Every structure is written in C-alpha cells, then in structure tokens.
Image: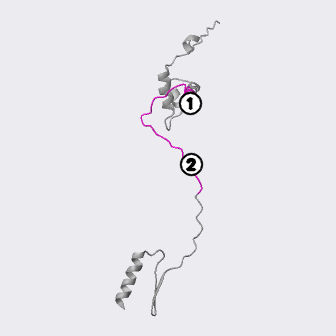
Amino acid sequence: METTLEVLTTRRGRREAHSHWPDEVKARIASESLRPGATVNEVAKRYGLKANHLSSWRTLARQGKLVLPEPEDAVEFAAMVVEPPAPEPPAAKQTSRAEIVVGSVTIRLEEGASAARIAAIARALAAAT
C-alpha cells in the first residue's frame, strides 16, 4: 500500500519573513503600547508582531533612538519629594498679661492685645469714674 504525505506550512522564505517597518509606524505602535491599560502582547498581536519586537522598539524609544509621537492626551508628571513634617517649635515662654486694676475690679487683657484695645478700655474706665 502506497502512502503520500503532504506537509503544509505557513512559513515563508527567509527573505519574506523579515518585514521592514518604517520608524514612524514603529513609533506609533510603541506609543500605543505605553498607554494605560495596554499590554505589549495585546498590541503586538493586533499588528501581527512578536512581543519581543515591540519590546525592542520600546527600548529604542527609552534610549532616544526612536522618537514617539506626542500623545493625544498628554499627561505630565512632576517630581515630588516627601519629607517628614518639621518638628513643632518649642513652646514659647508664657508672657504676662496686662492687668488693669480699678478698686476691687481687675481687668485682664488677652495676650497680644493691641494698643487700640488698651486705649479703648482706658477711655471707658475714665468715663465711668
């Protein structure tokens, strides 16, 4: 009994296997893979690429050898330095409060009372006596 064996392959010739992608296309695809939520595998599959090719394009972009297009929804980041909070300054010495004594009445003014406030109290006392 005679048997025939046929082998079907999708492999192309060695020259046809390597597609040349223009830098603009590489940059656009690499940029797409950098968007939030995108994965290298997903983007590579969409364009019929191997994930390692896309990863190498991303590396070229990081090295500045492949210029990525400006993203449509550009997000800018700023450096931020987090430092521990500054220690509280030591409590100031308690200052004495001004007191006005008239007979059996003592008026204690709040700390830092303004000159205008003290003058107003002095006028009120002068008018009352």
Residue receiving disc 2? 81
Q: Residue at x 53, y 23 (%)?
A: 49
Asked if residue 13 can be seen in this view, the reply is: no
Marks 2 and 1 sit apart, C-alpha to C-alpha, by 24 Å
Quadrant of residue 121 in the image?
bottom left
Q: Amino acid at mark 2?
A: Val
The answer to whether residue 16 shows anywhere in this view is yes
Query: Label 1: how many residues lie within 10 Å, few (<14), some (14-19) or many (20+)?
Result: few
Of tags 2 and 1, the one toward the viewer is 2
Please, what secondary structure does the residue beneath circle 2 have? loop
Mark carried by residue 62: 1
The quarter of the picture where the N terminus appears is top right
Q: Is residue 77 magenta?
A: yes
Residue found at the far right of this picture: 1
**Percent x, y for residue 33?**
51, 31
Image spot of residue 29 (x, y percent): 49, 27
How far from the left and from the top, in percent, is residue 97?
50, 79
What residue range appears in magenta?
57-84
- Residue in the picture at 47% in, 23% down: 25
Q: Taking 98 as reference, is 63 above or below it?
A: above
Which residue occupies the extreme top position in the image?
2
